[in-house]
Amino acid sequence: MAFTLAEIASRFGGRVVGAPQVLIRQVGTLERAGEGQIAFLANPRYRAQLQATRAAAVILAADAEALTPVPRIVCDNPYAYFARVSQLLNPVAAAAPGVQPGAHVAPGARVDRAARVDAGATVEEGATLAAGCWIGAGSFVGQGAQLGEGCRLYPSVVIYPGCRLGARVVLHSGAVIGADGFGIAREAGRWIKIPQIGRVVIGDDVEIGANTTIDRGAIEDTVIEDGVKLDNQIQIGHNCRVGAHTAMAGCVALAGSAVVGRRCTIGAGSIILGHLSICDDTQVSADTVITRSIRAPGTYTGLFPFDEHGSWARNTALVRHLAELAGRVRRLEQQLRQKDQEHG
Amino acid sequence: MAFTLAEIASRFGGRVVGAPQVLIRQVGTLERAGEGQIAFLANPRYRAQLQATRAAAVILAADAEALTPVPRIVCDNPYAYFARVSQLLNPVAAAAPGVQPGAHVAPGARVDRAARVDAGATVEEGATLAAGCWIGAGSFVGQGAQLGEGCRLYPSVVIYPGCRLGARVVLHSGAVIGADGFGIAREAGRWIKIPQIGRVVIGDDVEIGANTTIDRGAIEDTVIEDGVKLDNQIQIGHNCRVGAHTAMAGCVALAGSAVVGRRCTIGAGSIILGHLSICDDTQVSADTVITRSIRAPGTYTGLFPFDEHGSWARNTALVRHLAELAGRVRRLEQQLRQKDQEHG
Amino acid sequence: MAFTLAEIASRFGGRVVGAPQVLIRQVGTLERAGEGQIAFLANPRYRAQLQATRAAAVILAADAEALTPVPRIVCDNPYAYFARVSQLLNPVAAAAPGVQPGAHVAPGARVDRAARVDAGATVEEGATLAAGCWIGAGSFVGQGAQLGEGCRLYPSVVIYPGCRLGARVVLHSGAVIGADGFGIAREAGRWIKIPQIGRVVIGDDVEIGANTTIDRGAIEDTVIEDGVKLDNQIQIGHNCRVGAHTAMAGCVALAGSAVVGRRCTIGAGSIILGHLSICDDTQVSADTVITRSIRAPGTYTGLFPFDEHGSWARNTALVRHLAELAGRVRRLEQQLRQKDQEHG
């Protein structure tokens, strides 16, 4: 597959500067791209790489247009543009539809003719797979689960009974959707399990990373809205709601009943405690624990700075004496005030 | 399935106030429950919802009894009572016993007639499944592993060889029990593996969340006592011991040889470092790293507060200068003391 | 299997003190080892246990040689020595080669005659398994993936298409190698996926823990060099590079394009943010977030200390007022300076 710069620009817009007939077969990085490869500049930090690049062409913004003689496409959002070009050059692998030998499909499952189920996968009674679904080897779709058009389950994904996925949902290996939420009640020093009778309901165009877990609701549903993107090893507790087009980096955890708004970004390893709400367009930095609801959009941070071990030890030990230190400062202020009065 | 309030109270105790013949078919939330549904009030924060509820009945404590005219059951522990009612109305799904077509059961495995093994699951030589066990699709029970009565492995659970589970242990999808602990010895800049020859031994009535991992012991066993409840994505290192009826929220990690007492609760994302002991009845808050043994029951916390990014940056930068700040306060105190002596 | 102390010392070196004909059948701990078992002392903390031990023999360093009359092997690195002895006494379980009934091997896969594929496992077109590979039940080896000699995939491991493993790579259950990296570009409030066309390339003698995930590169490869040891539930983002003989404890996360040097150790739960570099021989403590590149070897720490909840609350609240506290100290200093000038 190959496209000229002119063909690419006629599909996706932007302005070609330099030879429009340059042939592009693949994407590459500024640093290593060569003949037939197109790179991009989105971050000013890499301007030096732009000047040294051997790429056949480059995608960049107008303010960097003059920095290279290489054939280029000038556009407003080079990173998004690059994404589209890469999608054009690297279409998602398809496979012939059909239930493959070695797949375990219950007689009462409704599998569209244009869906595919790989060897070792299980589709239970009453589950529905719409056209274009592809269930990878060893994956499991439980009783009555419903998958919209074009869902892709990579190998070893588990969808518990009754969960519902919209169209074009992508689940990477090891993702577990709809396991029981952590609902237990204490009585006389023991735990009594609370049946988890809600479902997980996922919108369209959601992508869920490897080994990410999303628990079913305790009573009502856990909801992931359209266009949400979740990285690997994320944990979403029961009855959470994640708003449309929100993205979360790896290892984030949402405790039960947390509600995250639309178009938020949550940094790696952060935790949202239970029953809290985060408003639309909020950014949470990496390793931040959100301990109260957020009502104003903005960036919120709570990571503790690292240091060379010795300095860390010296400074951090004092955190445990901050109240005492503040008290000493208060006494100094009082003493000085008193002195001022005496000598005033 | 439906029960009157009177029938429920005759099973579980409590006092019925209002119409005892109200028919209950399902549980619901105060906010959304309707006809045939019973809700509960355990947290005073939701009293306003109690007043507006359309639930057919409510479970509550005596101090809230007068706040609603809705038929109600008055009891000491409404949340635990609710758990029992929900269990009554939502019995665990059962399935016909038997080794299903497509399951891989070794000739030397001992599978009770009243156990079930789903398609794609593997049970190896010498493994034992007692009556009522249900091994989900694609799960794996290794050589010589022993499962007590009524264990439930959801799809894609892995039990390594030799591990032992008590009765009624529930493992959610992606849980891995008995993988090698992280035992490596350094020699000349390289790592030598230490064979992990212990097992994982799990008591009765333990529930383990999706994608949680519990490593086998290096020499002796890793032990999870009766009634322990582990949420998703927890990591338990080799040779840990978790005391009976302890509960851990998602993403907790126990480093090797950590010992956690009985009836403890560990908050989401917390870490217990290796070779430490935590006494019975200890509560560890979310995102707390336990760096020394705990000998007195209580609540322990170590999460770092988040803030709006600018405030966070201003304040947190000063953590690295705490030792210096403390020094300045000390000098101020000395100067004032000296002044007092001079002018005293 | 049994060896005399003399036989062990003739294989691995060291000096036998006491009866060289003592027969050793298994390893044990100082605390619990009995007849036929050999224990070790590597940490001075356990000297008391040495004095009470009932082990048949002990491995220790010269400085502890005189502390026990038990037959012993004196050597420089008792822990590494113990690792070798345990490997001798506990050889890795082997299994007959061959594609087992119930395995799904594509006609175009190249499986060496001396490799084994268990029931329920899938090996796709163009995948290559060298001699001695053992693919556990339900594992998946994608199109064109290449596995070197003696690789061991425990049950339920997933290798995405095109990834490459060196020799003797061990992957524990639930590990996912080569899922798509988290590459998304924002445009008008939505996310566009960036195809992840790089691979994961893993060197020789790497061990990867249960439920650990390593994403494929966005454009170029994600690389794990020889001898790297990764514990459970680690997340390695796209385009990371982990240097030879580096070890990471459980639940570590590397964001995209992070580069970790050789012979580093990374403590449990730590995070390395994206596009950073950490030099060779660096030690990162547990629960530390690395937010800038590290250019000098050493130990780096960033964990926030825990405390009894009340003390924690008092002290930690003040972190949010550190800038204000520092300002008050500055004003006190000014006032005192001014006083000195007035009265000076």
Image (spheres, coloured by chain):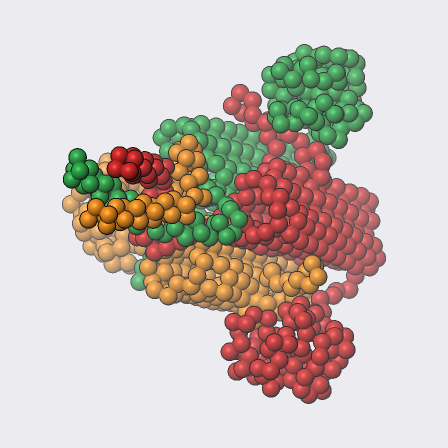
Chain colours: A red, B green, C orange
Which is nearer the eye, B293 or C154? B293
Compared with A11, B110 (above or below) is: above
Question: Left or right: C72 with respect to B300?
Answer: left
Which is nearer the eye, C325 or C192? C325
Compared with C158, A295 (above or below) is: above
Identify the image quadrant of residue B152.
top right
What residue is at 70 percent from the left and 70 percent from the top?
A84
Question: Left or right: B194 with respect to C22?
Answer: right
Identify the image quadrant of residue C325.
top left
Q: Position of residue B96 (x, y in %)?
A: 73, 35
What residue is at 61 percent from the left and 85 percent from the top?
A70
Question: Left or right: B337 with respect to A201?
Answer: left
Identify the image quadrant of residue C262.
bottom left
Compared with A319, C236 (above or below) is: below
Q: Can residue C28 be seen by looking at this rendering?
A: no
Q: Position of residue B12 (x, y in %)?
A: 66, 16
Which is nearer the eye, C21 or B252? B252
Q: Can residue B56 be seen by looking at this rendering?
A: yes
What residue is at 64 percent from the left and 46 percent from the top?
A279
Q: Position of residue C288 (x, y in %)?
A: 42, 52
Q: Position of residue B235 (x, y in %)?
A: 49, 44
What residue is at 28 percent from the left and 58 percent from the top?
C12
Question: Left or right: C235 with respect to B344?
Answer: right
